[in-house]
Image (cartoon, rainbow, N blue to C red):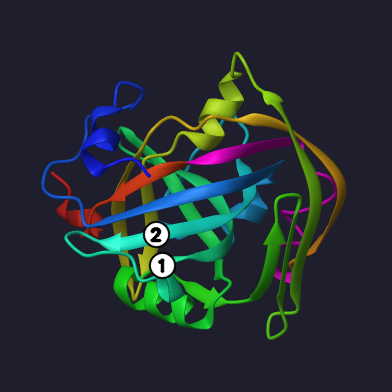
Amino acid sequence: MLKPAQVLALNTHRPWALPGGKWQFYMGWKRAVFLHWPADYDELRKFVHPDLEVDLFEGQPWVSMVAFDMVGVRPRNLIPFPPLSNFPELNVRTYIRSGDKTGVYFLSLEAGKRASAWFSNKISGLPYRFSRMSRDDRSYHSRNKPQNEHFSIEYTPGEIRTPKQPLDTWLTERYAVFQDSHGRLVEYEVHHEEWPIREIGISRLEYDYPRYRGLLQGPPQAAHYSEGVHVLTWGMKRMSERG
C-alpha cells in the first residue's frame, strides 16, 4: 500500500482542497464493483434525511450498490489488525450536496465480519451491520437473513475506461460522507487518489432489498470495476460546525 504522505500528495483531482487537521484512519478499498441505477426522486426522498439535499446529475438522482474489500483499516499511529481490519463490504448509497461539497449518503452499510461490523459502527457512528459474505476475483455474494436481503454477482473485469465520461466521475469521485448518526447530521471528509475504473462484464446478477424495491429495479444502467484506491478519512464533524 502507498504511504499516507504519498496518498496526500495525489490531490490535484479533488474538487476542493484537502481538509485541515490530521487524518484519523487509513485503509484500502480494493476489488470494487460499482452498480448504478437512476432513481425516482420522490421515492428516494423517503429514505434521505429531510435536511439533506439530494445531488442530481443532469436533473437525475442516482442510487448505487458498491461491493469491495476493506483492507488494512487502521487508526493513525497504529498498525492494522487483520481480524478486524480486513473484511468485505457492501453498501447501498445515494449522492448528496451540501454547499460546495458533494458526497455520499448510505442507505445500507454491511460488513462481512461480525466483529468488524460492530467495531466499525462504534468507532465511526456509521450504520454498519453484519451480513454473511463471500467473494473471489470474479464473484461476490452477500445475504442478510434478518432483513431478508441478498446480493450475488458474477463478473469479469474489462478494459480500462479511457476517457472517463462525466457520469463516471460524478458517481465515483466523492470526498465526503453525509449521514444522520444518533440523531445528528454529521460529515466525514475523505481523500483518495482518483479511481482507476474499468469496464465490467456481468454474467449473473441477483439481488433483493425489499426496503428499496422502489429504487433498485432491473439491471443497473451504469457499472464499473476498479482495482481500488488508498483512502484517508478525517473525524466526525457535526454539519452545523462546518466553517
Question: Residue shown at 21%/35% (left/top)?
Answer: 18
Relative horizontal placement of residue 101, taking residue 46 as reference (left or right): left
Q: Residue at x 60, y 47 (%)?
A: 31
Q: In this orientation, which residue lies closer to the viewer: 227 or 103?
A: 227
Q: Are marks 1 and 2 in contact (CB under 8 Å)?
A: yes
Can residue 29 be seen? yes
| Three-letter code, disc 1 | Ser
Residue 137 drawn at (x, y percent): 70, 50
- Density class for disc 1 (Cα within 10 Å; few <14, some 14-19, many ≥20) is many
Q: Which residues are magenta?
A: 210-228
- Residue 75's disc number: none
Return the residue nearer the eye: 124 or 132.
132
Q: CA distance from mark 1 to mark 2?
A: 5 Å
Quadrant location, the C terminus:
top left
The relative height of residue 165 versus residue 85 in the rendered view (above or below) is above
111 and 94: which is toward the camera: 111
Quick one: SS at disc 1?
helix
Say how many tags the image has.
Answer: 2
Residue 8: % across, % down: 24, 35
Compared to residue 165, the image places residue 70 above or below, namely below
Check residue 72 in the rendering and tell me which mark sits there, or answer none. 2
Secondary structure, mark 2, is strand
